């Protein structure tokens, strides 16, 4: 049997609800990644953080560094998708104004998890909370404003 293309597209959209237009990244192509419940608000708009839709940011984790898919941040809601692209267990924590050490579960190699936080003006720490990984370099500061 055949499934009309628009049906497939609708299903994909539903799966990705809340991630908005940043979805173009290939990182989310396989759906098994255990994304946390994104806010499934309708009326998603591209590019702005103020419309209520979370902006997706991929954080690639390796030994021992974090790499973000975005470098400029306006106040708003963001879904950080931690992607363990290394060889050992990692996780992602966010700490800053209004966000107290929010963190993903521990991730094994190849696993992903999403963390949705609302960022205000200020400086936030993104880091890996596993053992001494933060001190080894798995830390990034982002400036929101
Ligand atoms: Cu780590």
Image (cartoon, rainbow, N blue to C red):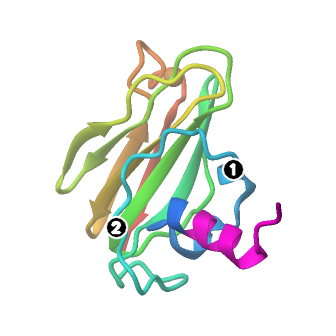
Which residue lies at the image location 52% right of the left edge and 30% below the top edge? 138
Q: Nearer the viewer, residue 142 or 26?
A: 26
**Where 145 falls versus 79 (above or below)?**
below
Q: Alpha-carbon distance for marks 1 and 2?
A: 20 Å
Q: Quadrant of residue 42?
A: bottom left
Residue 32 x, y percent position in the rendering: 60, 39
Q: Is residue 98 left or right of residue 18?
A: left
Near-viewer residue (50 or 98)? 50
Q: Residue at x 71, y 52 (%)?
A: 29
Question: Which residue is most to the right?
Answer: 1
Q: Is residue 130 visible?
A: yes
Element under label 2?
Answer: strand
Residue 5 vs residue 23, the one in the foreground = 5
**Which residue range is magenta in the image?**
1-13
In screen coordinates, is 144 left or right of 3? left
Identify the residue under disc 1. 27
Instruction: Report the disc number at residue 77.
Output: 2
Magenta span: predominant SS is helix
Indicate the secondary structure of the residue bearing disc 1.
helix
């Amino acid at each position: 049997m055949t499934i009309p293309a628009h049906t497939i597209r609708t299903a994909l959209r539903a799966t990705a609800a809340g991630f908005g237009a940043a979805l173009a990244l290939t990182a989310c192509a396989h759906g098994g990644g255990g994304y946390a419940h994104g806010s499934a608000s309708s009326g998603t708009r591209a590019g702005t953080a103020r419309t209520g839709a979370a902006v997706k940011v991929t954080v690639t984790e390796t030994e021992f560094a974090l790499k973000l898919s975005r470098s400029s941040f306006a106040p708003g809601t963001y879904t950080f998708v931690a992607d363990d692209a290394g060889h050992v267990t990692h996780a992602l924590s966010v700490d800053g104004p209004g966000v107290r050490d929010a963190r993903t579960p521990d991730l094994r190699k190849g696993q992903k998890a999403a963390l949705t936080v609302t960022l205000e003006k200020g400086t936030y720490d993104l880091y890996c909370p596993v053992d001494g990984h933060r001190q080894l370099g798995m830390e990034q500061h982002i400036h929101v404003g």
